[in-house]
Amino acid sequence: MKRILIGLVATTCLTSPAFAQMLELEKDELTLGFIKLTDMAPLAVAYEQGYFLDEGLFVTLEAQANWKVLLDGVIDGTLDGAHMLAGQPLAATIGYGTEAHIITPFSMDLNGNGITVSNEVWEMMKPNIPENADGLPQHPISAEALVPVVEEFNANGEAFKMGMVFPVSTHNYELRYWLAAGGLNPGFYGDGDATGQIGADVLLSVTPPPQMPATLEAGTIHGYCVGEPWNQQAVFKGIGVPVITDYEIWKNNPEKVFGITAEFAEENPNTTLALTKALIRAAIWLDENDNANREEAVEILARPEYVGADAEVIANSMTGTFEYEKGDVREVPDFNVFFRYNATYPYYSDAIWYLTQMRRWGQIAEAKDDQWYFDTAEQVYRPDIYLEAARMLVDEGLAPEDGFPWDTDGYKAPTPAEDIIDGLAYDGRNPTGYLESLEIGLKAGQTVSGSGVEG
């Protein structure tokens, strides 16, 4: 293996102006997991462009059946690390669901999700949506347009059901955020209740991402929130209409992360740095020169071993556009962001937003003070590892000095009210104040029982 590696390094030296500095790796053969979504792209690119090999890493990428199987694989060591929902390391570390200390040294992307409804629901919503001068719907579309639809379903004795991918997924929290901003209660989680449907106007349930379109087509759900390419797949199949992207819900919101156990990071610090370096290089490649490499990325992701959807479907969102109704294609250059806007930096304020949503909907049963949020974020998000890896890349000539937030304290500037669908600003330094500002959701002193919110 070492002989092969020396040959690869020699080849890199001959063909590149700069190359990765070899760390003394504690472990060089790794298996990494992912779910078939376009935002696993940094893993595929790091593999296909040879960035893992440049670091001396021999990586196998393995698609996983669902998010729980993926998390369990990382915890039991079957997987050395994985493309994860940002809520998974946080939930595991605080003991919600499976308990384990998971960390992230790398945020994989911003944006990338959408909310899709069935054709039937879309036709019912359209009379409630203002039109542009060209006759097309005005965006962003508020969930207020869905309120009379839900009321009509209920009047006919039918519950309104929507799918999301996992209880601690961005998709669950984004869907809930959109619904609540429009006046619909998506329900609460209570002690011993994992459905999250207590007091709900709209019933949310888990559906694995690749199964979303088929589940919608079967009528089991009336809409869903998922990452790409599964919103665009509904358009191509003619079975549904994406009504809003998460970029419109919260501009440049954090999405997936790369997760490893704290134990892995402690036992394999150089391997962890090498992984982070390779993933940062992949993210740079995905966004450089105004997304010039996206067509190649689409070709990679379309392969069956990665996402396995038609290249045309993946390109619909991956190359800077997004199609709502069939033929209603709009420019959304930041629908998928992998490196711009410090997308790869694991901000504490991003972690805190996820924790506030867990508390908002009852997954965290009791109110916490601000310090608890700060401390928990620092347990899981590891910008120290990230910046060490980034500094190495800059010193090696493989990344730009100005590409990283060297002087940050780990908190973004507050997200302004105009960048969020409900018009409420978010400041990660004030989590309890933020929670109190949200009209629908648990407040200080409130808990959830089987009959509803108490306190």
Image: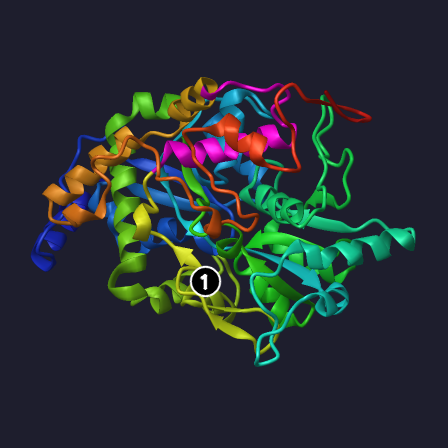
> Which residue is under mark 1?
303
Give me the residue at 46% from left, 21% from top: 370
Which residue ends up furthest to the bottom in the rendered image? 134
| Residue 379 relative to residue 165: left or right | left
Relative depth, front residue between 106 and 435: 435
Q: Is residue 72 visible?
A: no
Q: Which of 182 and 401 lies nearest the eye of the viewer?
A: 182
The residue located at (75%, 36%) in the rendering is 197
Percent position of residue 413, x then y: 35, 40
Image quadrant holding the C terminus, namely: top right
Question: In this picture, is 121 found above or below 283?
Answer: below
Above or below: residue 172 compared with residue 434: below
Q: Is residue 318 magenta?
A: no
Q: Residue at x 61, y 61 (%)?
A: 141
Q: Secondary structure at mark 1?
A: loop
Residues drawn in magenta: 346-370
x and y percentages locating residue 125 in the rendered image: 73, 64
Q: Quadrant of residue 214?
A: bottom right
Q: Quick check: 5 above or below 373?
A: below
User: Would residue 368 be counted in the magenta stretch?
Assistant: yes
